[in-house]
Image (cartoon, rainbow, N blue to C red):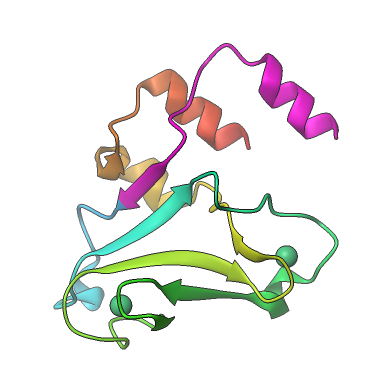
Amino acid sequence: MALLSVYNTACVALPETIRWTNPNPAPRDDPQDPVTILVRDPSLAEPTEDCDHRRTLHYYCTVHDMMYTKGGCGQGAHEIRLVCSEHGPERYPMDQLMVWNPSGFDPTLEAQQLDELDRW
Ligand SMILES: [Zn+2]
Ligand SMILES: [Zn+2]
């Protein structure tokens, strides 16, 4: 796969597991407990183009062990995965909120690593 070979030749190493928690949740999302997204992890599948993700994707909260809808799955902090009904848990693409709030990454990422993450 072309994408994979580009990634393998990159000189910036990314941590195996990356999580992101929004440090500045929008007021309309308050008061809700912190939501952490599992962005990258060896347990996650690579997103593929061969299924209609507008139809298949949902969020799953592993803390409360149920589908996640904004604050609706239980009390306390949430950790969510992007789940495709055909491929299972998938890697989470860098989104605009992450770009705006890079301090939410765990572990902390360098600027070069953020660029690398954004290139996926
Ligand atoms: Zn939850
Ligand atoms: Zn899929």
The residue furthest front is 43
Residue 14 placed where, x, y %? 47, 27
Total marks drawn? Answer: 0
Q: Is residue 79 positioned above or below 3 on the image?
A: below
Indicate which quadrant contains ligand 2: bottom right
Residue 84 placed where, x, y %? 65, 70
User: Which of 86 and 49 lies nearest the eye of the viewer?
Assistant: 86
Q: Is residue 65 positioned above or below 116 on the image?
A: below
Q: Is residue 22 magenta?
A: no
User: Which of 66 and 52 lies nearest the eye of the viewer?
Assistant: 66
Q: Is residue 71 shown left or right of residue 38?
A: left
Q: Is residue 13 magenta?
A: yes
Image quadrant containing the N terminus = top right
Q: Is residue 32 shown left or right of residue 113?
A: left
The quadrant where residue 48 appears? bottom right
Point out the stretch of residues depicted in magenta.
1-20
Q: Is residue 107 shown left or right of residue 58?
A: left
Q: Residue at x 32, y 38 (%)?
A: 102
Image quadrant containing the C terminus = top right
Q: Residue at x 42, y 40 (%)?
A: 17
Q: Residue at x 23, y 63 (%)?
A: 25
The residue furthest top is 11
Q: Residue at x 34, y 44 (%)?
A: 100
